[in-house]
Amino acid sequence: MDRNYYYQKRAQEHQREISQELTTRQLLNDANANPLATKRLKQIALRTVPATIVIITLLCLYFSG
C-alpha cells in the first residue's frame, strides 16, 4: 500500500510539473509573438510618418498662400 501511495503522489507531482512546463511554454510563445507585432508597427510608422509630414506641409503651404 505504501508503494501505491508513493507512485500516486509521484504521478501527481509529475503531472503538475508537466502542466507548469506547458504553461511556461505558452507564456513564452505569447511573449515572442508580441515583439513581432510591435516590430511590424514600427516599420509601418517609419514608412508613413514622412509621407504624412510632407502632405501636411504641402497642405499648410497651399492654404496659407
Image (cartoon, helix red, strand yellow):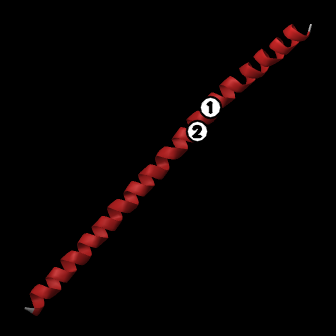
Q: Quadrant of the C terminus?
A: top right
Most extreme residue toward the front, as rendered?
63
The answer to whether 53 appears left or right of 18 in the picture is right
Residue in the image at 52% along x and 41% along y: 36
x and y, in percent, of residue 14 in the image: 25, 73
Most extreme residue toward the left, as rendered?
1
Residue in the image at 42% along x and 51% along y: 29
Mark sitting on residue 39: 2
| Crowd around label 1: few <14 · some 14–19 · many ≥20 (10 Å) | few
Mark sitting on residue 43: 1
Q: How many marks?
A: 2
x and y, in percent, of residue 64 in the image: 90, 11
Q: Quadrant of the N terminus?
A: bottom left
Q: Are marks 2 and 1 in contact (CB under 8 Å)?
A: yes
Mark sitting on residue 56: none
| 24 vs 15: above or below | above
Give amino acid for label 1. Gln
Residue in the image at 25% along x and 77% along y: 13
Q: Based on the displayed image, in which of its 4 quarters is residue 49 positioned?
A: top right
Give amino acid for label 2. Lys
